[in-house]
Image (cartoon, coloured by chain):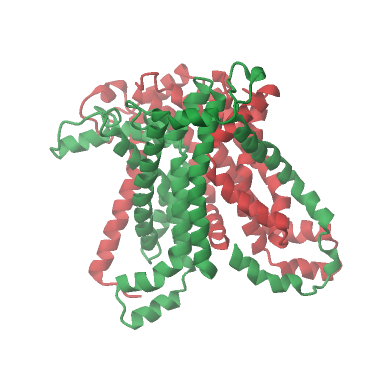
Chain colours: A green, B red
Amino acid sequence: MTSVTEAERPAARAPRPGGERRVTDRGAWFLVLPALLPILILSVGPLLYGILLSFTDAQSGRTEATRWIGGLNFQDLLHDTLFWESFRIGLVWAVAVTVPQFLLALGLALLLNQDLRLRWLARALAIVPWAMPEVVVGVMWRLVYAPDAGILNETLRDLGLGDGRDWLSGLGTALPAVVVVGVWAGMPTTTVALLAGLQNTPRELHEAAAVDGAGAWRRFRTVTWPALRPVALSITALNLIWNFNSFALVYVLTSGGPGGRTRLPMLFAYEEAFRYGQFGYAAAMGCVMVAAVSVLLAVLLAGRLRGGEAA
Amino acid sequence: MRTSRTGRAGQYAALLAYLVFLAFPFLWLVSTAFKPPRELARLHPTWIPEDPTLANFRQAFDEQPLLDAALNSLAAALGTAVIAVLLATPMAYVMARRRTRLARAATGWVVVSQAFPLVLVIIPLFLVLKNLRLIDSMTGLVMVYVVWALPFALWMLVGYVRAVPRELEEAAAVDGAGRLRTLVSVTAPLLAPGLVATALFAFVTAWNEFFFALVLLKTPEKQTLPVVLTHFIGAEGVADLGPLAAAAFLATLPSLVVFALIQRRITGGMLTGAVKS
């Protein structure tokens, strides 16, 4: 945002014809309120209310008798080994999904930036996973992973690689199986973001480097990557956050099973709130998750600042 | 730039691998949806159903209120699309044309809103909507969806407004057109494609949404498609694969159609957003 705003500043200051017709401040407020009020009431408000709830013993059945209990929820949470286990799974999952997602998307973006014949089709298809409901993505992969009727086991049988297994119910296989789906589902956004970054790098630079005799890897390292870095950094941080907070995919695939092996923090908090009715406690979990995510956001912003004008 | 012939071949091979990886789960879904129970129970499944049938679709409609669910989803998605764009456009205009502190705060909010776990928001929302008797109601759900779609809608729209040259508006002003007249006759027509793209984007997000719908809608007849889909998966995770596949196939068609219509614009919009931010 910074570079664009900076560039606009002189124009905004210069006297313009018809300048007196500019929106007055009151006019601007009038235009802004229709969107701002709902955001404040239904988004910022609940966020603050949620933080407040984390200091209470609110439960679904008896919200009228809610009492302020200070940091008790957080104290309990500190000793809740199940929660920290799910927190750990969330971190593992976020990294395990984000890293291959980024590498595959980078490859795909570089590929789609070339003059290839089927590029338009690939570009259109590359984003299809994004257009599908997450629930459908989950269902789809359940069909792929199905023990007998699934295509994965059938392919493995054809290749002579074992007799097939129940991937989503195996203690050791569930998390990796779910990670593959996460990678698949998140690739489009990452690809599109990186493709945008690539198209932002001046072609002439590439050509100049090529004329100078730089190989593909040198060109990538010295021309492409520096220009891509800010976008890559932002999308990676966002992906880590999105993945850490994800819910629907895993809910459909395993519901957090087997034995909690895929129980991401969001699934844990959802169950705590809407199965056991522990609103206050679940809100405290949400707060801890926000804290974890804020650290990531801070890293993102710091990286952006260092990225400077290129951003 | 010149690439060697083997390099080219490698690129096409990689492209093909990607396409297969992207397409095969969806092709498998379609294949499963049209298989008779007999073929689904067999150990060695085939890609092409030997005896394609619509029985799974019939069974899916018999087992769950799929039609209600589709209508509910449609209502939620249409409502969200129209309202979100109506609310977002004026604010996006201000954000794009003027650098107020508010515009900067709003941009910050777009980032922040992406980051917080929804569970922290859903509990208070649940309590508030319950007090307003808006649990299990489309109104409540659309209210939540609109606010949830607003940040990205704003982001996209700001990009589209910026793409309308300021000079055109200024020229109209010089010609003596009033503010409103300029907006209606100069800006709006140029902005129209962007408005449609944003609306369709909001449509797809609402159509696909699961978490809020899962929490806020209780009665089976009032639930949206993604929620009803999960009913095909039993309590122990056992699923009747045929009807599940059929219902999933139906649930994904509208977003794919809408998506096909605006594919270029969406990537365009996201590209603009990514570049501008």
State whether residue A90 appears in this view. yes
A41 in relation to B58, above or below:
below
The quarter holding residue A90 reads: top left
B194 in relation to B124, above or below:
below
Q: Quadrant of the N terminus of chain A?
A: bottom right
On screen, residue A200 versus residue A158, left or right, reads: right
Q: Please give the name of the residue rendered at 80% of the width and 61% of the height, measured from the top-left corner.
A: B182
On screen, residue B217 versus residue B179, left or right, reads: left
Q: Position of residue B31 (x, y in %)?
A: 33, 34
Q: Position of residue B243 (x, y in %)?
A: 39, 24
User: Which of the two residues, A266 or B90, is positioned nearer the viewer here?
Assistant: A266
Q: Please give the name of the residue rendered at 70% of the width and 50% of the height, measured from the top-left corner.
A: B89
Q: Please give the name of the residue rendered at 80% of the width and 73% of the height, measured from the top-left corner.
A: A16
On screen, residue A302 versus residue A187, left or right, reads: right
Q: Position of residue A287 (x, y in %)?
A: 54, 37
On screen, residue B10 versus residue A243, left or right, reads: left
Q: Position of residue A172 (x, y in %)?
A: 25, 33
